[in-house]
Image: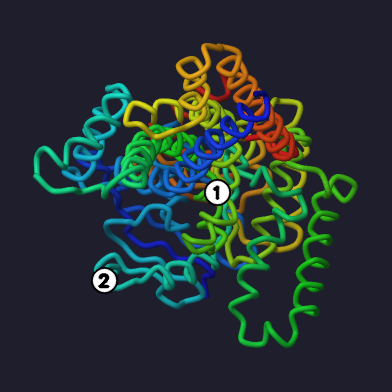
Amino acid sequence: MFQTVLISLNEGFLKTLEIFGLTLLGAFPLGLIIAFGSTSQFRPLKYLVKFIVWVVRGTPLMLQLLIIYYGPGLLLGSNWWGNGSSGRFTAALAAFIINYACYFSEIYRGGIEGVPKGQSEAGQVLGMTSSQIFFRITLLQVIKRIVPPMGNEIITLVKDTSLARVIAVYEIIWSGQMFIKSSGVIWPLFFTGVYYLIFSGVLTLLLGRLEKKLEFFRV
Amino acid sequence: MSVLEVKNISKRFGETEVLKDVGFSLEKGEVIAIIGSSGSGKTTLLRCLNFLETPDGGQIYVNGEILFDASNHKLLTEKDIRKIRLHFGLVFQSFNLFPQYTALSNVKLAGELLAKERSDYKENHKTILKEIDENASGLMLQVGLTDKMHLYPHQLSGGQQQRVAIARALALSPDVLCFDEPTSALDPELTGEVLKVIRALTEKNTTMVIVTHEMQFARDVADKVVFMDDGFVVEAGTPEEVFGHPKQERTIRFLERYSNL
């Protein structure tokens, strides 16, 4: 029995990890693009982006998952996301990436705006180009500023991945819950909690190490 | 021939005219002190010289060559502006050292980046980088921070940070070194060490434009003093003329306020 549960939970956890990893992979760059949009000098773009960020941050991720999965099919009448579990998985990823990119964009924006203007001015008077100023001066200061808030979001994402089950993506909690129905036992569900604890524990350690690495300077 | 000649510079922010027809000239090795109350346009003038602001009117000449003319500045590319900037160095009120680099690396960084643009960089990069390193170490010695050069900015006092900033500005050997109230952000007991470094530069014939509130210092080191008020140059002359025998009503009132402090 234990063996069966473990195999099943591992399978579910793999899906959880996939959602987690791919969401970060998509949301890190997309968030930066959104951040540039919301700080744009071009007003219409700025307000459009700010509006989108407001909607995404102001509504539940659960709702966004449902709308993104069912919406295209019902509104456009086409099978937008493809069939079966791979279609549901793609839809879930899209929802997660959009949602997290919006949160990340605000963190990036805060990080970029937090670097004093004098830093880039000092670079300018020393004859540096704008890209030299960004990569050699600003970037590391931004990273140092955003690691703690980013860390919070990343840990939250670990747990948010479980929401994917509302559109039947079989992640770890789904796997655990199956055993209530099939065998009438609840301990596998408790066991899923251990997976989350270990995973977020490892992430906390890694993030702490990164913060420590950046402690050699102060901003 | 003047190292620096500033003619009829004007600058407005929106409706406010911050600089009105400001001009002065500077010979090699001369020091000019710009005094005046806050909001008089002193800092904006320095920022114009370093192209952190673009003047709306006027011309800037360096070594007799026209560097900037407001009537056709739109033609300047970022590359041109970078080149022009290298004629000037700027020491900020708030130091603005790069926190993630050691003191020495702060001094070296810009030189190393510029060296990469040299056509002979590939073949000679070892010699070039060695030169930059030696030059930077020499500057750290000059500002008296050889023993601190491997520390990060947050490990230094304000006075030490400002001395590093001076070394950093000197590293690219600008024709004119500008100071924007270099001691205003410092505790009183730390201003001395910074003023001492600036004073030592006058003996090395460094051409400098110093915006300062340290009247005694300005009187001691400057060859010329400019008093600015409300965006105008109200009075200009030798320290003896401006401090000793001010002619304008506004200058007299300003200096009185200072001596009463």
Query: Amino acid under label 2?
Result: Asn
Quadrant of image for the C terminus of chain A: top right
From the viewer's perspective, is residue A218 above or below residue A201? Answer: below
> Crowding at label 2, few (<14), some or many (≥20) Cα neighbours within 10 Å?
few
> Crowding at label 1, few (<14), some or many (≥20) Cα neighbours within 10 Å?
some
Query: Amino acid under label 1?
Result: Leu
Apparent side of residue B207 relative to residue B70 in the rendered image (left or right) = right
Q: Nearer the viewer, mark 2 or mark 1?
A: 1
Q: Residue at x 64, y 56 (%)?
A: B169
From the viewer's perspective, is residue A145 above or below residue B240? Answer: above
- In the image, residue B17 lies at what x, y percent? 26, 43
Measured Cα–Cα span from mark 2 to mark 1? 34 Å
From the viewer's perspective, is residue B72 above or below residue A47? Answer: below
SS state under label 1:
helix
Pick the residue in front: B142 or B150: B150
SS state under label 2:
helix
Q: Quadrant of residue B88?
A: bottom right
Q: Which chain's residue wears label 2?
A: B
Pick the residue in front: B222 or A160: A160
Judge whether residue B198 can be spotted in this image. no
Q: Which residue is mark 1?
A: A139
Quadrant of image for the N terminus of chain A: top right
- In the image, residue A211 lies at what x, y percent? 68, 34
- In the image, residue B158 lies at what x, y percent? 71, 34
Label drawn at residue B72? 2
Q: Residue furthest right?
A: B147
Q: Residue at x 68, y 68 (%)?
A: B112
Q: Which chain's residue wears label 1?
A: A
Q: Are marks 2 and 1 on the same chain?
A: no
Apparent side of residue B129 relative to residue B112 in the rendered image (left or right) = right
Q: Residue at x 49, y 61 (%)?
A: A131
